[in-house]
Amino acid sequence: MSWALGVAVLALVGGASPDPGSLPEEAQTVRLASGPVVGMPLDGEPIPNLPSYDGPHPASQPRPDDPVHFPIALGEVGPAEALFAGPRQYPFVCGTEKSRLGPPVVDNQEGIGTAVYALRNGERVLQGYSRDCGARSRVWYYYKPIDSEEFTPWYADADDVDQAWVGGKRVPFIVRVEMGTINRFIYALAVLRGEHETAAEPGVDRWNRRLIYQFQGGVGIGHRQGSVDPARLLKERAAQLALGYAVAYSTGNATSNHYHVWLQEDTALRVKRQFVARYGVPRYTVGIGGSGGGLQQYLLAQNHPGLLDAGIAQYAYPDMVTQTIPIFDCELLEHYFDVTASADPLWHKASGRALVEGYSADDAAPDRYGLVRKLASAARAEWPNLAAGQTECTASWRGLTPLVLNPRYTSFADKLAPALVDRVHWSHFDDVNNVYGTDTQGFARVPWSNVGVQYGLAALKAGRISVAQFLDLNAKVGSWVKPAQMQRERFWHLSGNADSELKDFSPSSAQNIAQGPGEQPAPRYQGDLQAMAAAYRSGMVFLGKLDMPVIDLRHYLDPELDMHHAAATFSTRARIAAAGGEIRNQAIWMSRKPDDPTPIAFAAMDRWLANLHAHPERGVSGNRPTMAEDRCWDKDSKLIASGKRVWDGAWNGQPRGACMARYPIYSNTRREAGEGMAGDVFKCALQPVAAALARGLYAPLDMRPYQAQLERIFPDGVCDYSQPDRGRPNDLALSR
């Protein structure tokens, strides 16, 4: 660590920078470092027979009083135990060093957690262990240099400080950054440095009384603290900081670390309390963040009204868990296309596979696993069978199914002592097992189901696949084995599985796909009804309740086969409409790179909230300004269209609007099987094949000659998507 950086990360009590020559000799020769997680408490082991959550919805109940006094003082460690989200999870990988906070605080000598060492003149001496990755709260300052977009640690003699514009006057663009840990996650508060402040006494004279709560995306399964790069955070929100906005963030609100909505809310609530105790109550709090950072805003708006006053949800999905419904289909279908039906030329191109998968496709897109797959085929003495091009399933979602579903796979095993890896069930559902519950072996219950799903139904009815292809596909596509039966992934060196050989490489996780015996149809997966009900009751599912302004903002990325497909926005709107909500509480904005409407979104939201403050009787939608109407732009920032009907289309049964014509949305595996736009059906209602035939489900085709084959493939019946989700409880209450 350089002296400059060392000064920057000190907890500056009075704002002065010490002279390096004045440091004691010991401080110049001793530093701390940490190693991997080497142990965990016994209560970190999987617990059998945990009940699935069966309580009231979060929106209908108050939160407990917080015993923690805020603010957390500089030099102190924030709470490790969450307020209401449930028990702490172990093992827990620390990120304090990567966040420039130094090694975590030693909290035990029993060998639990991360080993912390002192390095004295090249010798490593064990100091103890950190099970909860605590870090003492501290403050330092960053500034934006002139002619640079990168923030850097500030010193009193810096002569290249850029300027911000606050309250009609220019001020030095110097930002106070406070960091520490709350709920074991690393929080950060960033505010323009006050004119007369010290690190111990922040000034508020350059804060515009508006707070941004930053959310981040990614896919995580818990067990990680995550890390914060202060300079990157400041750069991301530089335009708003320059106007006097404050920014709050926590790694507990990065879905790259976890998707436990209770813990996300618990953490955001406490981080905001830390901010309020330090700076005062903001005029409003607006969320911003992409992907998982966008969906958190929808869920927090539903589950805890008032925690946020508004949201700018970028690249958002309605929630995470219902996205797994079509995504878990992807690798099953790809395995069928690659292996089971590899002789059928229709599946040799991505565009053919898209007839069933529904997502965007490009027959010329390169396969990032192509070389490894060819080498694996050669190792098996087989001719490689690679499709021409990619669909969104393979280009974006490949690898996500095992990460989220397989309890025997983790992407960060290198951060753990080998003995710990096999003691933990690594999946999203196990991470949130106090919601989903566990079975008799301690594996989490899984809500995903594909019983009765007729893959490729729309393509069959449109004449794009034949009856024979439809029947073969549905007879052989199969499902996932139960969690207790899952094996380690065979990604070869890509997964860190030293036991996996190149010839075993399987990007579709073939070893975990359930196949039928002999000529019998492959079994389908019976999702757990208790887990489904728990997902709804716990607030993990967005039900369409939205009583705050949200600008749903994204670039149109479908041609790039990006996972942040535009259809997700309309799934959210469909749920709002289905719940009887006011769809005008959500504004849909879309553009193309490199245009970025985010600064306009902040201005529009400021106007919207000002209107709402002045005229609360008009409600959220009644206060929506013209500049916050649904709209779309081109890549050169030129407005294409704006207004109520611009996003109409087949998804809502209306003539196609101007924005939808420019940025058409694609489908997914379940919509191609007959599900509606909302995309919130875990377990479809089943109807006998005979009843489906009588209703004309396959029209214009006459499938009566194939009734016996259909009944053999679907012994429990086929999906009736005109009925509600069988996993949704009938007694959900979303108000107190």
Image (cartoon, rainbow, N blue to C red):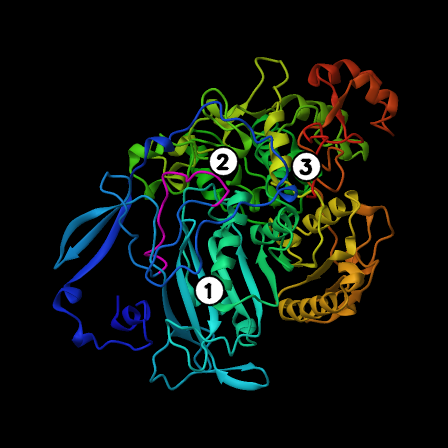
Q: Position of residue 167 (x, y in %)?
A: 58, 82
Amino acid bearing label 3: Thr
What residue sits 34% from the left and 82% below the top? 156
Q: Which residue is mark 1?
A: 189
Residue range (magenta):
83-99
Q: Which residue is mark 3?
A: 669
567 lies above or below 343: below
Q: CA distance from mark 2 to mark 1?
A: 35 Å
Q: Earlier in the sequence, mark 3 or mark 2?
A: 2
What residue sits 36% from the left and 83% below the top? 158
Query: Looking at the image, do the residues carrying marks 2 and 1 touch, with CB atoms under 8 Å apart?
Result: no
Q: Earlier in the sequence, mark 2 or mark 1?
A: 1
Q: CA distance from mark 3 to mark 1?
A: 42 Å
Q: Which residue is mark 2?
A: 402
Q: Position of residue 334 (x, y in %)?
A: 59, 34
Majority secondary structure of magenta residues: loop
